[in-house]
Image (cartoon, grey):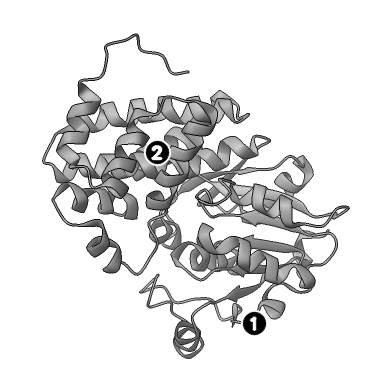
Amino acid sequence: MKTDTVSIGVVGAGSWGTTLAQLLAGKGYDVTLWVYERELLDVLVATRCNTWFLPGVQLHNSIRFTNNLEDAVGKKQLLLWVTPVKAFRTVFSQSLPFFDDAIIHISASKGIETTSLQTVAQIARSLLPNGSKSSLCVLSGPSFAREVARNMPTAVVIASADHHAAEHAQYIFATPYFRTYTSDDVIGVELGGALKNVVALAAGIVEGLGLGNNTRAALITRGLAEMIRLGTAMGAQPLTFAGLSGIGDLVLTCTSTLSRNYSVGKELGSGKPLGDILASMQMVAEGVTTAQSANALADRYGIEMPIVREVYQVLFNGKEPLRALQDLMNRELKREVML
């Protein structure tokens, strides 16, 4: 596959999907961006600006916009999936008839499906027909969309069991301001990108309660231990969590109000009901549903994940955030271990 002839479909026109479409178009690739909302599609066609999710960024004239899935994914050599995780299975299934036989799929979504407890790559693998020549990759790391859209230096990792596909995707996405690394630890990279959102909710709750940097640092560190614990049980390489998709993304998401999950946690800690918080948001905070999935995975694998458990209790069982923090602090004393 010659890189200069690659035709790319980007499925999902949120802030991250729009930003990555802009990055790829800026490198001269033929990019089609699939838009779910008809009203947003009209805005994009009329203004070439995603005023809903990425205001202030004028998009390249070469990007094509569509809400027709066949137009978005048919005759493409590379497909970038940036839909909310809860919508991925449906959209991917509807797209199956239009895929070319040999294609690279890249997921840039971060989450775990609540019904199956599968990651996006696992869902895609289960839906692709036997004998498919498609390759699966995942892209993750510390990357706020609006900073990437402003060409601020960013580093991410692209993971795949097919190292040729990972290296090909690495070259396609790399720019002087967007540095790409490769990995073969698909499940580790996906879990890092998903689970850090749950810890970010906890970090935001700490901020909303008016507590200090000590508390947040403790949550980040012990949250990382929980991520490693579950990841190892699910077949991930522990060192992956010391990289961009682990500690890198975790620190970013737990320390900035640009993080949707951190912001949701902050409002929860301030006493605002979850339903009101989510109703006021246009974008998706994946950490809320991921907390449900992570709690179920902890049960499935018999893994101790006290921070995940307490976040789940706050989100779904109405537990007071301060009480949740107190219960974490008053657990049985033990040795510090990361695994």
Q: Position of residue 38 (x, y in %)?
A: 50, 85
Q: Position of residue 22 (x, y in %)?
A: 53, 68
Q: Is 319 positioned to the left or the right of 27 in the image?
A: left
Q: Is residue 241 above or below residue 113?
A: above
Foreground residue, 254 or 272?
A: 272
Residue 235 occupies quadrant: top right
Task: Tell me if mark 1 has few (under 14), some (14-19) or many (20+) residues whose alpha carbon lies within 10 angstroms of its own.
Answer: few
Q: Is 182 positioned to the left or the right of 208 in the image?
A: right
Q: Amino acid at mark 1?
A: Asn
Which residue lies at the image location 20% right of the left edge and 57% below the top edge?
273
- SS at badge 2: helix
Circle 1 sits on which residue?
68
Q: Quadrant of the N terminus?
A: bottom right
Circle 2 sits on which residue?
250
Q: Position of residue 113 (x, y in %)?
A: 53, 51
Residue 53 occupies quadrant: bottom left
Which residue lies at the image location 39% right of the left edge and 38% below the top edge?
250
Residue furthest left in the image = 210
Residue 243 seen from this side: no
Task: Tell me if mark 2 has few (under 14), some (14-19) or many (20+) residues whose alpha carbon lies within 10 angstroms of its own.
Answer: many
Q: Are marks 2 and 1 in contact (CB under 8 Å)?
A: no
Q: Amino acid at mark 2?
A: Leu
- SS at badge 1: loop
Say which mark, if any, is on residue 31: none
Q: Is residue 58 above or below residue 183?
A: below
Q: CA distance from mark 2 to mark 1?
A: 35 Å
Foreground residue, 89 or 192?
A: 89
First in sequence: mark 2 or mark 1?
Answer: 1
